Image: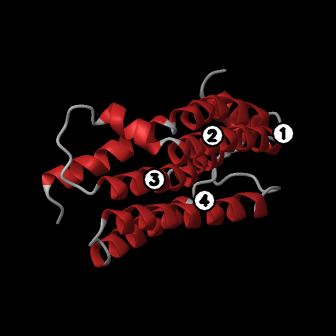
Amino acid sequence: HFDPAVAGYYSTCALIGKAFLFPPAAFAAALFPKVSELHAAGKDPFPLLNKSLLISTAALIAGAVFCTAVPRLILDVLLHGKEITYPYADLVTLMRVFGWMVIPYGLLNLIVYFNLAMHRNAFLYMLVGGGVLLIALLTMFHDTLLKVITIFGGVGYGLFLASCLVTYMKKGENGEGVSGQDIYCDAGV
């Protein structure tokens, strides 16, 4: 629906947003084995999740504030020397909004890794439903980049909140199918 230049502007905003997802991704990768180990030992891994969410939230908010505070600087650096055919004020708005719309995806990544480490996989159906909802909404409402970004973020916030509710409501439950001790036995450890 969008011409190539406009799609390129979206990609520019997405590039910055993805850069802010690296710290939570690193936390998620480090979280998985630690949560699995705590779970296998019968210890509570939720304090580790709480710390990871807190630190990641701070990093993501710092990124969003950066996008909000200096969007013109970011755009000037990324689009230096390129002819801009989209209204510059609209690009500034997109950059500001995009910074806030990637936050739930960084945090959702932590929740996904945490649940997988706990051998809880029923929540994946909710993620599939969220993906279907995102596709449906984008199919119906895609006339502006701002709508696309807002829908992307809105679904992300909804998925993150729903995943948190499910994760914390099942705090005392073991995972589906495999106990932590079985992992180490089956792996020969």
CB under 8 Å between discs 1 and 4: no
Q: Earlier in the sequence, mark 3 or mark 2?
A: 2
Q: State the residue position of label 1.
A: 42
* Residue closest to the eye, 137 or 146: 146
Q: Regarding mark 2 in the picture, which secondary structure is present there?
A: helix
Is residue 125 at all visible to an observer of this figure? Answer: no
Residue 143 placement: quadrant: bottom left
Badge number at residue 62: 2
Badge 1, how many Cα within 10 Å: few under 14, some, many 20+? few
Left-right relation of 163 to 139: right
**Position of residue 70 in the picture relative to residue 178 (left or right):** left
Nearest-to-viewer mark from 3 and 1: 3
Closer to the chain start, of discs 3 and 4, is 3
Write the residue at 62% across / 22% down: 188
- Residue pointed to by mark 3: 98
Q: Disc 4 marks which residue?
A: 160
Q: CA separation, marks 1 and 4?
A: 26 Å
Q: In which quarter of the image is residue 113?
A: top right
User: In the picture provided, is 141 more to the left or to the right than 104?
Assistant: left
First along the sequence among labels 3 and 1: 1
Please tell me which residue lies in front, 40 or 163. 163
Judging depth in this view, the residue of 150 and 186 nearest the camera is 150
Judged from this view, the residue extending furthest toward the left is 3
57 shown above or below 26: below
Q: State how the image is colored.
A: secondary structure
How far across and how far down the image is residue 102, in percent? 50, 51
Amino acid found under the numbered disc labelled 3: Phe
Looking at the picture, how far across and down is residue 73, in whole percent?
Answer: 42, 36
Gap between marks 3 and 2, in whole Å?
A: 13 Å
- In three-dimensional space, the C-alpha distance between marks 1 and 2, rounded to whole angstroms, equals 35 Å
Residue for point 51% across, 39% down: 21
Q: Tag 4's secondary structure?
A: helix
